[in-house]
Image (cartoon, rainbow, N blue to C red):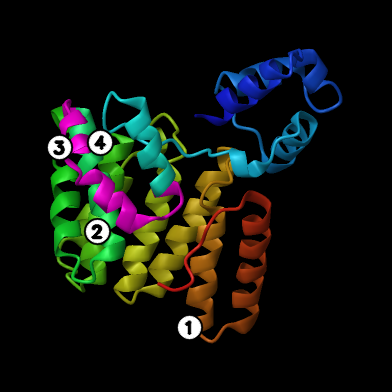
Amino acid sequence: MSLGTTLKQVRQQQHRSQKNIATGICAQSMLSAIENDHYTPNAKLLLALCHRLGISLDEISLATDFAISGDDALNTRMQELCNQHRYQELHDFLTDSITLAAVTTGEQTQAYYYYLGVAELHIDAQLTHAAQNLKFAAAMAEDHTATTLTRLATASLATVLAKQRQSGQVAQLIDQALVNLDQRPYEENQNIIFYLAALAAYFLGKPQVASQRLLTGISFTTEHQSHYMLANYYRLLAEIANQAGKANKAEDARQKQQFLTELFHEKVPEKF
Protein backbone atom coordinates (compact mmCIF):
# COMPACT_ATOMS: atom_id res chain seq x y z
CA MET A 1 0.00 0.00 0.00
CA SER A 2 1.37 3.42 -0.93
CA LEU A 3 1.95 6.24 1.54
CA GLY A 4 -0.94 8.29 0.13
CA THR A 5 -3.33 5.36 0.20
CA THR A 6 -2.40 4.58 3.81
CA LEU A 7 -3.01 8.15 4.98
CA LYS A 8 -6.29 8.38 3.07
CA GLN A 9 -7.53 5.04 4.37
CA VAL A 10 -6.77 5.92 8.01
CA ARG A 11 -8.38 9.38 7.63
CA GLN A 12 -11.55 7.90 6.14
CA GLN A 13 -11.70 5.20 8.83
CA GLN A 14 -11.71 8.01 11.38
CA HIS A 15 -14.48 9.81 9.43
CA ARG A 16 -12.40 12.97 9.23
CA SER A 17 -12.24 15.45 6.36
CA GLN A 18 -9.12 16.52 4.51
CA LYS A 19 -9.67 20.03 5.88
CA ASN A 20 -9.74 18.70 9.44
CA ILE A 21 -6.47 16.85 9.02
CA ALA A 22 -4.66 19.53 7.01
CA THR A 23 -5.55 22.59 9.13
CA GLY A 24 -2.42 24.06 10.70
CA ILE A 25 -0.17 21.57 8.90
CA CYS A 26 -0.51 22.14 5.15
CA ALA A 27 -2.97 23.26 2.52
CA GLN A 28 -5.92 20.96 1.90
CA SER A 29 -4.86 20.77 -1.74
CA MET A 30 -1.45 19.45 -0.67
CA LEU A 31 -3.01 16.74 1.48
CA SER A 32 -5.17 15.78 -1.50
CA ALA A 33 -2.05 15.54 -3.67
CA ILE A 34 -0.35 13.36 -1.05
CA GLU A 35 -3.34 11.04 -0.74
CA ASN A 36 -3.45 10.63 -4.51
CA ASP A 37 0.31 9.94 -4.68
CA HIS A 38 0.97 13.12 -6.68
CA TYR A 39 3.29 14.52 -4.00
CA THR A 40 5.61 12.90 -1.45
CA PRO A 41 5.81 14.83 1.84
CA ASN A 42 9.12 15.64 3.48
CA ALA A 43 9.97 14.17 6.89
CA LYS A 44 8.58 17.09 8.93
CA LEU A 45 5.26 17.10 7.08
CA LEU A 46 4.96 13.31 7.21
CA LEU A 47 5.55 13.28 10.96
CA ALA A 48 2.92 15.98 11.52
CA LEU A 49 0.28 14.14 9.48
CA CYS A 50 1.03 10.80 11.13
CA HIS A 51 0.85 12.41 14.59
CA ARG A 52 -2.53 14.00 13.84
CA LEU A 53 -3.91 10.74 12.50
CA GLY A 54 -2.48 8.80 15.43
CA ILE A 55 -0.54 6.31 13.33
CA SER A 56 3.01 5.05 13.72
CA LEU A 57 5.66 5.44 11.08
CA ASP A 58 6.09 1.68 11.41
CA GLU A 59 2.89 1.42 9.36
CA ILE A 60 4.31 3.50 6.52
CA SER A 61 6.25 1.82 3.73
CA LEU A 62 7.16 4.22 0.95
CA ALA A 63 8.90 1.77 -1.34
CA THR A 64 6.53 -0.19 -3.55
CA ASP A 65 6.96 -3.93 -3.98
CA PHE A 66 6.43 -5.56 -7.35
CA ALA A 67 3.64 -8.10 -7.78
CA ILE A 68 4.68 -11.71 -8.39
CA SER A 69 1.13 -12.92 -9.03
CA GLY A 70 -2.49 -11.87 -9.36
CA ASP A 71 -3.14 -13.21 -5.86
CA ASP A 72 -3.09 -10.33 -3.37
CA ALA A 73 -2.55 -12.69 -0.44
CA LEU A 74 0.62 -14.10 -2.01
CA ASN A 75 1.90 -10.62 -2.86
CA THR A 76 1.25 -9.44 0.69
CA ARG A 77 3.07 -12.43 2.15
CA MET A 78 6.03 -11.85 -0.15
CA GLN A 79 6.11 -8.17 0.83
CA GLU A 80 6.05 -9.01 4.56
CA LEU A 81 8.95 -11.45 4.31
CA CYS A 82 10.99 -9.09 2.15
CA ASN A 83 10.40 -6.01 4.31
CA GLN A 84 11.23 -7.98 7.45
CA HIS A 85 14.43 -9.32 5.83
CA ARG A 86 13.40 -12.92 6.50
CA TYR A 87 15.30 -14.15 3.47
CA GLN A 88 15.34 -17.89 4.14
CA GLU A 89 11.58 -17.85 4.62
CA LEU A 90 11.25 -15.67 1.52
CA HIS A 91 13.25 -18.22 -0.49
CA ASP A 92 11.14 -21.10 0.82
CA PHE A 93 7.95 -19.18 0.04
CA LEU A 94 9.05 -18.35 -3.51
CA THR A 95 10.07 -21.92 -4.31
CA ASP A 96 6.82 -23.39 -2.96
CA SER A 97 4.72 -25.02 -5.67
CA ILE A 98 1.66 -22.91 -4.79
CA THR A 99 3.59 -19.68 -5.28
CA LEU A 100 5.17 -20.91 -8.51
CA ALA A 101 1.77 -21.84 -9.95
CA ALA A 102 0.48 -18.31 -9.33
CA VAL A 103 3.22 -16.62 -11.40
CA THR A 104 1.69 -16.26 -14.86
CA THR A 105 2.62 -13.06 -16.72
CA GLY A 106 5.98 -11.89 -18.03
CA GLU A 107 6.06 -8.96 -15.61
CA GLN A 108 5.26 -11.24 -12.67
CA THR A 109 7.95 -13.67 -13.77
CA GLN A 110 10.54 -10.89 -13.88
CA ALA A 111 9.55 -9.78 -10.37
CA TYR A 112 9.61 -13.39 -9.17
CA TYR A 113 13.19 -14.00 -10.31
CA TYR A 114 14.29 -10.63 -8.95
CA TYR A 115 13.01 -11.46 -5.46
CA LEU A 116 14.37 -15.00 -5.66
CA GLY A 117 17.78 -13.57 -6.55
CA VAL A 118 17.60 -11.11 -3.65
CA ALA A 119 16.71 -13.90 -1.22
CA GLU A 120 19.60 -16.05 -2.47
CA LEU A 121 21.95 -13.08 -2.22
CA HIS A 122 21.45 -13.14 1.54
CA ILE A 123 21.39 -16.89 2.22
CA ASP A 124 23.82 -18.39 -0.31
CA ALA A 125 27.48 -17.64 0.38
CA GLN A 126 28.49 -18.85 -3.09
CA LEU A 127 26.06 -16.41 -4.78
CA THR A 128 25.90 -18.60 -7.88
CA HIS A 129 22.13 -19.01 -7.92
CA ALA A 130 21.62 -15.35 -6.96
CA ALA A 131 23.64 -14.25 -9.99
CA GLN A 132 21.77 -16.61 -12.32
CA ASN A 133 18.32 -15.49 -11.22
CA LEU A 134 19.16 -11.77 -11.20
CA LYS A 135 20.67 -12.10 -14.66
CA PHE A 136 17.48 -13.77 -15.83
CA ALA A 137 15.34 -11.01 -14.28
CA ALA A 138 17.48 -8.28 -15.82
CA ALA A 139 17.20 -9.85 -19.26
CA MET A 140 13.41 -10.06 -19.17
CA ALA A 141 12.71 -6.41 -19.98
CA GLU A 142 9.86 -6.20 -22.45
CA ASP A 143 10.92 -4.32 -25.61
CA HIS A 144 14.24 -3.66 -23.83
CA THR A 145 12.55 -0.99 -21.70
CA ALA A 146 14.67 0.05 -18.72
CA THR A 147 11.94 -0.08 -16.10
CA THR A 148 12.74 0.43 -12.43
CA LEU A 149 12.48 -3.32 -11.86
CA THR A 150 14.88 -4.03 -14.73
CA ARG A 151 17.33 -1.44 -13.38
CA LEU A 152 17.09 -2.93 -9.89
CA ALA A 153 17.77 -6.42 -11.20
CA THR A 154 20.71 -5.12 -13.25
CA ALA A 155 22.23 -3.19 -10.33
CA SER A 156 21.68 -6.15 -8.00
CA LEU A 157 23.47 -8.43 -10.47
CA ALA A 158 26.37 -5.96 -10.61
CA THR A 159 26.56 -6.02 -6.81
CA VAL A 160 26.68 -9.82 -6.74
CA LEU A 161 29.44 -9.92 -9.36
CA ALA A 162 31.39 -7.23 -7.49
CA LYS A 163 31.10 -9.20 -4.26
CA GLN A 164 32.48 -12.21 -6.15
CA ARG A 165 35.31 -9.95 -7.42
CA GLN A 166 34.17 -10.52 -11.02
CA SER A 167 34.75 -6.93 -12.07
CA GLY A 168 34.54 -7.42 -15.85
CA GLN A 169 30.83 -6.65 -16.34
CA VAL A 170 30.18 -4.52 -13.27
CA ALA A 171 30.85 -1.08 -14.78
CA GLN A 172 28.68 -1.80 -17.82
CA LEU A 173 25.83 -3.12 -15.68
CA ILE A 174 25.91 -0.09 -13.38
CA ASP A 175 25.88 2.22 -16.40
CA GLN A 176 22.82 0.38 -17.71
CA ALA A 177 21.09 0.73 -14.37
CA LEU A 178 21.79 4.45 -14.01
CA VAL A 179 21.57 5.72 -17.60
CA ASN A 180 18.95 8.49 -18.00
CA LEU A 181 17.48 7.61 -14.61
CA ASP A 182 16.85 11.28 -13.85
CA GLN A 183 14.72 11.51 -16.99
CA ARG A 184 12.36 8.73 -15.94
CA PRO A 185 9.14 9.27 -13.92
CA TYR A 186 10.21 9.11 -10.29
CA GLU A 187 9.64 5.98 -8.22
CA GLU A 188 11.04 5.57 -4.72
CA ASN A 189 12.58 2.22 -5.60
CA GLN A 190 14.95 4.17 -7.84
CA ASN A 191 16.71 5.31 -4.65
CA ILE A 192 17.94 1.75 -4.18
CA ILE A 193 19.78 1.81 -7.49
CA PHE A 194 22.26 4.46 -6.31
CA TYR A 195 22.89 2.47 -3.14
CA LEU A 196 23.56 -0.72 -5.11
CA ALA A 197 25.86 1.16 -7.48
CA ALA A 198 27.82 2.44 -4.48
CA LEU A 199 27.88 -1.00 -2.85
CA ALA A 200 29.29 -2.54 -6.04
CA ALA A 201 32.11 0.03 -6.06
CA TYR A 202 32.73 -0.61 -2.35
CA PHE A 203 33.05 -4.37 -2.93
CA LEU A 204 35.55 -3.69 -5.73
CA GLY A 205 37.72 -1.57 -3.42
CA LYS A 206 36.80 1.79 -4.96
CA PRO A 207 35.78 3.88 -1.93
CA GLN A 208 35.91 7.24 -3.71
CA VAL A 209 33.57 6.05 -6.45
CA ALA A 210 31.29 4.51 -3.83
CA SER A 211 31.19 7.74 -1.81
CA GLN A 212 30.39 9.84 -4.87
CA ARG A 213 27.53 7.55 -5.84
CA LEU A 214 26.16 7.73 -2.30
CA LEU A 215 26.27 11.54 -2.31
CA THR A 216 24.55 11.55 -5.70
CA GLY A 217 21.92 9.20 -4.29
CA ILE A 218 21.35 11.45 -1.28
CA SER A 219 20.82 14.45 -3.57
CA PHE A 220 18.51 12.44 -5.84
CA THR A 221 16.46 11.19 -2.91
CA THR A 222 16.07 14.52 -1.11
CA GLU A 223 15.29 16.38 -4.34
CA HIS A 224 12.28 14.09 -4.67
CA GLN A 225 11.14 14.79 -1.10
CA SER A 226 11.87 11.22 -0.04
CA HIS A 227 13.70 9.69 2.92
CA TYR A 228 13.74 6.09 1.66
CA MET A 229 17.28 4.60 1.72
CA LEU A 230 18.88 7.71 3.32
CA ALA A 231 19.78 5.75 6.47
CA ASN A 232 21.45 3.10 4.32
CA TYR A 233 23.36 5.74 2.35
CA TYR A 234 24.82 7.20 5.53
CA ARG A 235 25.53 3.76 6.99
CA LEU A 236 27.75 2.91 4.03
CA LEU A 237 29.36 6.38 4.07
CA ALA A 238 30.25 5.81 7.72
CA GLU A 239 31.78 2.42 6.89
CA ILE A 240 33.88 3.90 4.08
CA ALA A 241 35.08 6.83 6.21
CA ASN A 242 35.90 4.50 9.11
CA GLN A 243 38.01 2.24 6.90
CA ALA A 244 39.83 5.31 5.57
CA GLY A 245 40.66 6.39 9.13
CA LYS A 246 38.49 9.51 8.89
CA ALA A 247 36.95 9.32 12.33
CA ASN A 248 35.12 12.67 12.23
CA LYS A 249 33.43 11.95 8.91
CA ALA A 250 32.57 8.45 10.06
CA GLU A 251 30.96 9.75 13.25
CA ASP A 252 29.03 12.46 11.39
CA ALA A 253 27.63 9.91 8.92
CA ARG A 254 26.86 7.47 11.72
CA GLN A 255 24.91 10.08 13.69
CA LYS A 256 22.84 10.95 10.62
CA GLN A 257 22.19 7.26 9.99
CA GLN A 258 21.11 6.67 13.59
CA PHE A 259 18.79 9.69 13.53
CA LEU A 260 17.14 8.51 10.30
CA THR A 261 16.89 4.93 11.55
CA GLU A 262 15.16 6.05 14.75
CA LEU A 263 12.86 8.39 12.83
CA PHE A 264 11.83 6.09 10.00
CA HIS A 265 12.70 2.62 11.37
CA GLU A 266 14.67 1.78 8.23
CA LYS A 267 16.84 -1.25 8.79
CA VAL A 268 20.53 -0.95 7.91
CA PRO A 269 23.17 -3.71 7.67
CA GLU A 270 25.44 -4.34 10.63
CA LYS A 271 28.23 -5.40 8.28
CA PHE A 272 28.86 -5.57 4.54
Instruction: Please report the residue visible at 84 percent of the width from the left and 21 percent of the height from the top.
Output: 23
Does residue 176 show up? no
Q: Which mark is residue 243?
A: 1
Looking at numbered disc 4 in the image, what kind of residue is underneath it? Ala
For the residue pair 269 and 232, the one nearer the viewer reads as: 269
Q: Which of the two marks, 2 or 1, is nearer to us in this view?
A: 2
Looking at numbered disc 3 in the image, what kind of residue is underneath it? Met
For the residue pair 246 and 129, the one nearer the viewer reads as: 129
Q: Which of the two marks, 3 or 4, is nearer to us in this view?
A: 3
SS at mark 4 in the image? loop
Q: Which mark is residue 146?
A: 4
Q: Which mark is residue 106?
A: none
Which span of residues is magenta-colored?
82-106
Looking at numbered disc 1 in the image, what kind of residue is underneath it? Gln
Residue 79's x, y, as percent? 40, 40
In the picture, measured across the screen, residue 157 lies left or right of residue 192, that is left
Cα distance in 3D space between marks 3 and 1: 38 Å
Number of marks in the image?
Answer: 4
